[in-house]
Image (spheres, rainbow, N blue to C red):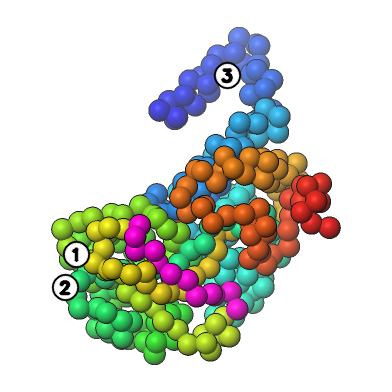
């Protein structure tokens, strides 16, 4: 449908150009900027949609139009923003930290991404472990010898799964059969009996877990309990819960403990101040409208949307935060 509309617009522009009239000036002035998100059953994809929907109401004022792309997740988004293939992206706060600092044990070891810029934080995400009841998995230890999706390379969750497994004394390369599937494929694979469990770092509620918990194979959320030393080692992780009431089909009767991060919105220092300013201004000035666009945003406040950022704040974003008195 959207593609069809674009094609018509393009054809009209070609026809006008052929007639020597040139494209309409408003059309020529619009800059298309793309937001990288995640799988379509996650929360990043609707988040990209929510941001685009709010900001595009002012597309003429800012001369930009945001478009949304489904991607492999945080790591992919950061790399694509750094290469200029994407302009904005939703990324996990831990990944933002690792990329900017070139952290050891990360994809960016020795390669700090100094052009990465933070804009704001969004919803909390929990590292969520979901298993088939018939696989007899009640703790991390029970994952040994099982077929478990830890996440695709390019996703944010893959390293979260590896860190949690390592903290439980489990080597993901030796002690289990680790799969590298995209999160959107995992619920179907679990229902088909092709995997026993999967990890997904995501906001709740999410389509992926609605899907995983509404099939004929009974599934449950498995607790991930970690010692204090884990949180001391990784400053970007914090304890969290999986709110099981969001998933009536799950075989759990109480919320499940886990750990988590925050979804954040990032860009590159190379993206123009006026565009970054426009995005930030529209989201904060339409905060109540934005907050209604996904149930995972229920906990958002303007203040906590500035927490969990580790890359420098983009100058265009800073301009708005100063104008609004949110930063000095
Ligand atoms: N946290 C996941 C990642 O960074 C994506 C979650 C989502 O799409 O909502 O890969």
Q: CA distance from mark 3 to mark 1?
A: 54 Å
Residue appearing at x 42%, y 58% in the figure: 204
Q: Along the polypeptide, which appears first: circle 3 or circle 1?
A: 3
Task: Identify the magenta region.
Answer: 235-246
Dot 2, how many residues are within 10 Å of its Cα: few (below 14), some (14-19), or many (20+)? few
Position of the N terminus, as image quadrant, is: top left
Q: Which residue is mark 2?
A: 134
Identity of the residue drawn at 73% across and 44% down: 277
Quarter where residue 233 is shown: bottom right
Residue lying farthest to the front in this orientation: 254
Q: Residue at x 53, y 89 (%)?
A: 229
Quarter of the image for the C terminus: give it: bottom right
Where 287 falls versus 42 (above or below)?
above
Does 16 lie within the magenta span?
no
Q: Which mark is residue 13?
A: 3
Residue 240 is inside the magenta segment: yes
- Give the residue at mark 1: 218
Circle 3: element type: helix
**Side of 46 where 278 appears, left or right:** right
Q: Which label lies toward us, 3 or 2?
A: 2
Q: Does any portion of residue 94 appear in the rendered image?
A: yes
Asked if residue 217 lies left or right of residue 15, the reply is: left
């Amino acid at each position: 449908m959207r593609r069809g509309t674009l094609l018509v617009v393009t054809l009209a522009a070609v026809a006008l150009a052929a007639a020597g009239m040139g494209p309409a000036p408003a059309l020529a002035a619009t800059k298309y900027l793309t937001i990288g998100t995640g799988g379509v059953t996650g929360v990043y994809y609707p988040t990209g949609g929510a941001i685009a929907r709010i900001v595009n109401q002012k597309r003429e004022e800012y001369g930009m139009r945001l478009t949304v792309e489904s991607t492999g997740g945080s790591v992919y988004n950061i790399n694509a923003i750094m290469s200029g293939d994407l302009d904005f992206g939703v990324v996990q706060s831990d990944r933002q930290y690792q990329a900017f600092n070139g952290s050891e044990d990360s994809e960016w070891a020795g390669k700090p991404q100094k052009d990465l810029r933070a804009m704001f934080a969004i919803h909390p995400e929990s590292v969520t472990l979901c298993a088939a009841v018939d696989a007899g998995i009640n703790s991390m230890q029970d994952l040994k010898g099982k077929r478990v999706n830890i996440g695709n390379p390019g996703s944010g969750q893959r390293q979260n799964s590896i860190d949690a497994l390592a903290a439980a004394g489990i080597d993901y390369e030796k002690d289990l059969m680790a799969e590298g599937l995209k999160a959107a494929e995992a619920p179907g694979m679990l229902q088909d009996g092709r995997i026993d469990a999967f990890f997904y770092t995501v906001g709740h509620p999410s389509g992926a877990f609605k899907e995983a918990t509404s099939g004929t194979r009974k599934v449950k959320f498995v607790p991930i309990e970690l010692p204090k030393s884990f949180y001391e080692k990784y400053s970007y992780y914090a304890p969290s819960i999986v709110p099981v009431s969001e998933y009536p089909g799950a075989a759990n009767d109480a919320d499940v403990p886990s750990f988590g991060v925050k979804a954040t919105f990032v860009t590159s220092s190379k993206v123009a101040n006026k565009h970054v300013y426009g995005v930030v201004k529209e989201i904060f000035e339409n905060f109540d409208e934005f907050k209604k666009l996904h149930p995972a945003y229920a906990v958002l406040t303007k203040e906590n949307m500035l927490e969990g950022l580790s890359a420098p704040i983009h100058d265009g974003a800073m301009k708005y935060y100063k104008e609004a008195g949110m930063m000095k």
